[in-house]
Image: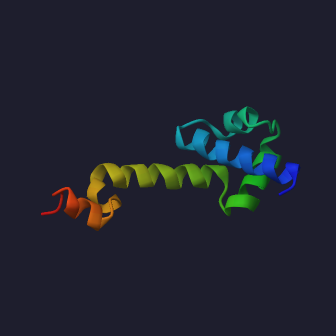
Amino acid sequence: MTPKNYLIKTRIENAKKYLSNGCSVLETGMMVGLESPTSFTGMFKKITGLTPSGYQKQENLRKQKILQSPLSFVPNCFAETHGWTN
């Protein structure tokens, strides 16, 4: 992996964390070192296949589903071992 690719990968991984925690797309882009929202959105979409706002919506839905039904996100073998199944 080239240094440039490593930097891009690191920026995108950090951006995913910021977006998951509720930061705006503009704030996230600036925090990961991309001051242009257009270049940040383009790079994020190229790497992840989703726009930053689309990724944020997807993560929010996932969090809601976890809150509604937490056991559906735990492997069944683990839940059975700990007596968490009905």
Position of residue 47 measured from the top left corner of the image (x, y, whole percent): 73, 59
Q: Taking 15 as reference, is 74 left or right? A: left
Q: Is residue 69 visible?
A: no
Q: Residue furthest left?
A: 86
Q: Give the number of marks.
A: 0
In this image, 40 relative to 52: left or right? right
- In this rendering, the answer to whether 72 lies above or below 4 is below
The x and y percentages for residue 48 are 67, 60
Query: Where residue 44 sits: x, y (%)?
Result: 72, 53
Q: Is residue 21 above or below residue 73?
A: above
Observer-nearest of 1 and 65: 1
Image vertical order of residue 51 relative to residue 16, above or below: below
Q: How is the image coloured?
A: rainbow
Q: Residue at x 15, y 58 (%)?
A: 83
- Camera-side residue of 16 and 2: 2
Determine if residue 82 is in view: yes
Q: Tell me if 67 is positioned left or right of 45 in this view.
A: left
| Residue at the spot 29% in from the left edge and 54% down from the top edge | 70
Q: For the point 83% across and 58% down, which residue is it?
A: 1
> Residue 15's image quarter?
top right
Which residue is at 62% across, 49% downward? 53
Give the side of residue 42 with respect to residue 3, left or right.
Answer: left
**Quarter location, residue 86:** bottom left
Residue, far bottom: 77
Residue closest to the eye, 55 or 2 = 2
Percent from the top left, x then y, of residue 77? 27, 67
